[in-house]
Amino acid sequence: MKNVIFLTALLALGVFGSIRAQSDEARRFAIKSGHIEYKLTGSTEGIKSVWFDHYGDTYVEELQATTTVKMLGMKSVEEIHSLTIQQGAIVYTLDLASGTGQKTVNPYYTDGHALVESMTAKEQEEFANDLMASLGGEITGQESILGKTCDVMQVLGSRSWIYKGVTLKSDTKVLGIRNLEEAVSFEENVRIPASLLEPPSHIEIHDLTENAVYEETMGSEYESASEEEWEEEEIIPVKMPFETFKKGVAGVMPDGFSNVSEVSLEGQHMAVYRKTITESFTVIASAMEGADVDSEEMEAFESFRENGKKMHYSASVEEGMPVSVLIIEYPGYETYITLAASFGLSKNEMLKLAGKLNF
């Protein structure tokens, strides 16, 4: 589906901060290994623990937090306990609270590394700067966090403190609600216990790796198709009115995020929300006509029915960042509604957000 291709390109905009000041190799961080403990305050309170090795190619993140939202005299509280384990192209996205999770393979892992490794360090930095400029971002100076000199990046209403590709602090304030994530300890060049790389035995894991055929199918299609052939592909306009789309997504914005834009572009409607440089959430409306959800390209997705609607869910890693996608079919509008999170959400978490759609 061209929609998935477009979505992947969009999500890639969230990772420019981590390719600054890197070597000629494809590295997520400019530090070989590390262990970071973060304190979260604001509407989401708790702790986040991160371990990484091989310059971020091995990455483990555990989040234990409580999100509290007060609005119009009502309060909702959500407990979160999640675990993400990435080893090269393989990624586990686990919901420790529900005892479920997915194992997926990043279909763009090899091509992504090849792309970055084809650039010099200077070209990587120029690419990162161009991306940041396209989002209206800038580096406002340098500050010290835990004795580490960080570039302070400001973009889309948020600030992040970046040390050698590693975010040590992020600060956002949306509608008077502040969310702060700050490292309280950081150890460089440490050894990661092997036990951290194995999913807990009690988690029921849905293995989607056998269905991950993107690299074999989409990649070969890209190489064989000429630029003119792609330009001639017709994008069928979505039939859902733009005003209907805007009203339908009005309540879906995740807590702590800000509304960056709502646009209708080239036959698709889109709403983009962002919390930090690397955390974005996107909703896209696209035409069902001309798209084939039964194609090989979609085999990496889990298909199921929820609340009377047919849905398709996938969790993967794009350029080293966890990405979750949920596609919902609305036959009455002849429309697909696609939800995408660049920070990795479990199937249950995506379904909760989908439950806020009003179509």
Image (spheres, rainbow, N blue to C red):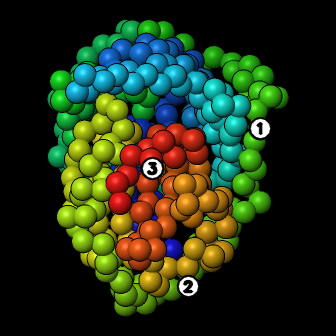
Q: What residue would you read off at disc 3?
A: 354
Query: Between residues 207 and 53, which one lies in front from this camera angle?
Result: 207
- Is 324 displayed left or right of 45 in the figure? right
Q: Is mark 2 on a helix, strand or loop?
A: helix
Measure the alpha-carbon separation of dots 2 and 1. 40 Å
Measure the alpha-carbon separation of dots 2 and 3. 36 Å
- Is 233 displayed left or right of 217 in the figure? left
Q: Is mark 1 on a helix, strand or loop?
A: strand
Estimate the x, y position of residue 237 in percent, counting from the top left. 31, 80
Q: Residues within 10 Å of mark 2 (few under 14, many from 20)?
A: few
Estimate the x, y position of residue 319 in percent, counting from the top left. 51, 49
Measure the alpha-carbon separation of dots 3 and 1. 23 Å
Mark on residue 113? Answer: none
| Camera-side mark, 2 or 3 | 3
Q: What residue would you read off at disc 2?
A: 224
Query: Could you tell me how many numbered marks the image carries?
Result: 3
Marks 3 and 1 close (CB-CB < 8 Å): no
Query: What's the residue type where badge 1 is placed?
Result: Glu
Residue 68 vs 286, above or below: the answer is: above
Q: How crowded is mark 3: few (under 14 residues within 10 Å), some or many (20 or more)?
A: many
Query: What's the residue type where badge 2 is placed?
Result: Ser
> Mark 1 or mark 2, which is nearer the start of the sequence?
1
Q: Quadrant of residue 313?
A: bottom right
Query: What's the residue type where badge 3 is placed?
Result: Ala
Looking at the image, which residue is at 61% across and 59% down? 305
Q: What residue would you read off at disc 1?
A: 204
> Mark 3 or mark 2, which is nearer the start of the sequence?
2
Looking at the image, which residue is at 77% across and 38% down? 204
| Camera-side mark, 2 or 1 | 1
> Mark 1 or mark 3, which is nearer the start of the sequence?
1
Q: Quadrant of residue 7?
A: bottom left
Estimate the x, y position of residue 215 in percent, counting from the top left. 64, 67
